[in-house]
Image (spheres, rainbow, N blue to C red):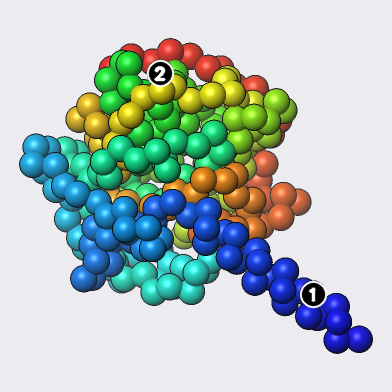
Amino acid sequence: MKLPLIFLTVNAVLATTSLQAAVVGYWRFEDGAFMDDSSGNNRHLTTNAAPNDAEQIALPASGNGSEYPTTIPATSATNGSAAAFDGDDRMAVTYNAAFKSTTMTLEAFVTTTVTSGTQTVAGMWNATSNRVYLMALSTNVLTYFINGGNVSSGLPALAANTDYYVGISVDLSDATTNALTFYQKNLATGQVWISNVASPTTTLTSGTSSFSIGRTSANSSSFTGLIDEVRFSNTKLGAEDLLVVIPEPSTALLAGAAVLLGFRRKRGV
């Protein structure tokens, strides 16, 4: 009778090990390791002399950032601080082929203080010939930029001065409308939105941009507000492996499920 329990334990260990191996970079912005990579891969962030550097802030008892979890559900790690971006800040990892993958998951906690423009969360995006992928807010709508164009999640716009989890899980080889899965969770209310969208392409451009947080390598599309717990994995994670708890689809608000949204060229990002 104990044999099934042994198998379950082994499977759980293997699943955890596999997930850890999939994490390419994880930036938590904690004390003593503000720009350090927590994945174990030593892909630490560096700052840009111009624009300026983001600042570390302690998570407050109220206001922006107060709803960020103090313990990350997926890792049981303590979370006590975040990075504050004032509209001209960027941190980055020099180009590394490990960040070029046709399967990926981008995740972060974000709080924007504005309601317009394109705001970079994280990704590889530079000049016109070097645009690879980017998780960003476009007029506060969660958007995946890829190969010079973009795919909108179709989810509700993020409200300013409100704490959210955002994630985009990608498998460009998937020919169905499940190639891109967008996750959005209001951390104060627990409300979740999920959108499954077809991919406009099966490949990534050959660009070699650095992996940037808060502003693109072209020093455009800056984020204004807080960013925390940025994680990049080289596989399309399911809801059960994300940094936050996502309810089953039956209890979540599914928005735009299995709908192909427009892929359009966008300049000046």
Q: Residue at left 53%, top 42%?
A: 104
Q: Position of residue 98 (x, y in %)?
A: 42, 43
Q: Residue at left 63%, top 53%?
A: 239
Q: Secondary structure at mark 1?
A: helix
- Choose between 172 and 83: the one closer to the eye: 172
Q: How many marks?
A: 2
**What quarter of the picture does the C terminus occupy?**
top left
- Pick whichever of labels 2 and 1 is earlier in the sequence: 1
- The kind of residue on which mark 2 rests is Gly
- The kind of residue on which mark 1 rests is Phe
Q: Residues within 10 Å of mark 2 (few under 14, many from 20)?
A: many
- Choose between 158 and 23: the one closer to the eye: 23
Q: Residue at left 20%, top 60%?
A: 56
Q: CA distance from mark 2 to mark 1?
A: 46 Å
**What quarter of the picture does the N terminus occupy?**
bottom right
Q: Position of residue 184 (x, y in %)?
A: 52, 46
Picture disc at residue 148: 2
Tell us which disc is closer to us: 2 or 1. 1
Q: Is residue 148 above or below residue 240?
A: above
* Residue 162 in sight in this render: no
Q: Residue at left 72%, top 69%?
A: 11
Which residue is label 1 attached to?
A: 7
Q: Is residue 233 above or below residue 145?
A: below
Q: Please give left or right for residue 253 compared with residue 84 in the image.
A: right
Q: Residues within 10 Å of mark 1 (few under 14, many from 20)?
A: few
- Choose between 70 and 45: the one closer to the eye: 45
Q: Position of residue 82 (x, y in %)?
A: 28, 60
- Choose between 59 and 130: the one closer to the eye: 130
